[in-house]
């Protein structure tokens, strides 16, 4: 579990580093400029797919730990964990590479102003006057299908988990199982809900301010909140927080 949390923390750090430092620098120097190369690099290093794949792998980790604890060492040995984490990273980098290369191969003939604090594909496509954007739309459809598959896998995993938890006779067993699953479930819910809000937001209610808020919602909030959610399992941190509140 902590091996996967380490990978999740690194992904969150990369996602925040791709957007927040430049936003802070632009705010400090009162500018909104970003180079063409910098925009491409920012788009490439924002590994949303890798994080989603890693969250899917973590749901499988919890499924095996709770539903098949005696086989945990066999099904999720160190080599299997490394392979699954590497697959999540590789899928994220491949997805980012394909989208970045395809997006920046389009001719941009409607100016060079993005109404965001970082580069993202839908805003860049609005600047294109080429019919080649349909190819990018095809990539987006494929990505949506993969994301839906991961979502179904996570849901099925938790259905099996909760069925197994309900058969646990002791209250201590319930508490241990829920303390293992609830932080991950909270992170998945936050991640999926923000992405769905972005994807399902009607174009008719779009505005520069709303687009900015939505971008912050799905690019900054989940990576920033994830460490807080998982750290709540640490008894020393919870004790320090109670002392601070009191």
Image (cartoon, rainbow, N blue to C red):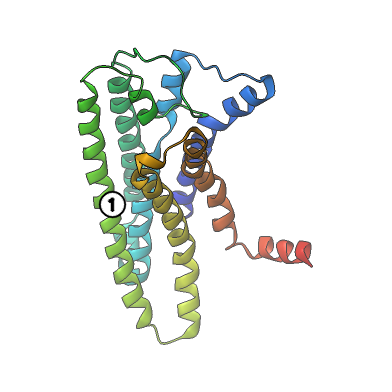
| Residue drawn at point x = 33 percent, y = 24 percent | 125
Q: Secondary structure at mark 1?
A: helix
Does 190 sit above or below residue 177? above
Q: Is residue 184 left or right of residue 82?
A: right
Q: Is residue 19 left or right of residue 195?
A: right
As rendered, which of 20 and 232 lies closer to the eye? Answer: 20
Does 120 sit above or below residue 191? above
Quadrant including the N terminus: bottom left
The image quarter containing residue 198 is: top left
| Residue drawn at point x = 58 percent, y = 25 percent | 22
Q: Which residue is mark 1?
A: 150
Q: Position of residue 105 (x, y in %)?
A: 29, 15
Q: Position of residue 216 (x, y in %)?
A: 52, 40
Does 128 sit above or below residue 226? above
Q: Position of residue 148 (x, y in %)?
A: 26, 50
Q: Is residue 213 left or right of residue 92?
A: right
Q: Position of residue 159 (x, y in %)?
A: 30, 70
| Residue drawn at point x = 46 percent, y = 55 percent | 187
Quadrant including the C terminus: bottom right
The image quarter containing residue 64 is: bottom left
As rendered, which of 71 and 145 lies closer to the eye? Answer: 145
């Amino acid at each position: 579990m902590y091996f996967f949390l380490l990978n999740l923390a690194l992904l969150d750090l990369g996602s925040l580093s791709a957007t927040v430092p430049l936003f802070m620098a632009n705010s400090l120097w009162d500018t909104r400029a970003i180079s063409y190369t910098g925009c491409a690099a920012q788009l490439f290093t924002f590994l949303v797919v890798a994080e989603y794949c890693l969250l899917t792998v973590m749901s499988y980790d919890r499924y095996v730990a709770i539903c098949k604890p005696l086989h945990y060492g066999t099904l999720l040995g160190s080599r299997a964990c490394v392979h699954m984490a590497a697959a999540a990273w590789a899928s994220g980098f491949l997805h980012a590479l394909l989208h970045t290369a395809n997006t920046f191969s389009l001719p941009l003939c409607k100016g060079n102003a993005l109404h965001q604090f970082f580069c993202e594909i839908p805003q860049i496509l609005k600047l294109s006057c080429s019919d080649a954007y349909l190819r990018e739309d095809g990539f987006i459809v494929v990505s949506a299908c993969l994301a839906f598959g991961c979502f179904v896998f996570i849901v099925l995993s938790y259905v099996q988990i909760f069925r197994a938890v309900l058969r646990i006779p002791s209250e201590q067993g319930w508490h241990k199982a829920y303390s293992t699953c609830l932080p991950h479930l909270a992170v998945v819910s936050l991640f999926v809900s923000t992405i769905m809000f972005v994807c399902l937001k009607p174009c008719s209610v779009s505005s520069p301010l709303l687009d900015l808020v939505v971008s912050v919602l799905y690019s900054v909030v989940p990576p920033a909140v994830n460490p807080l959610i998982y750290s709540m399992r640490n008894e020393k941190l919870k004790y320090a927080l109670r002392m601070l509140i009191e």
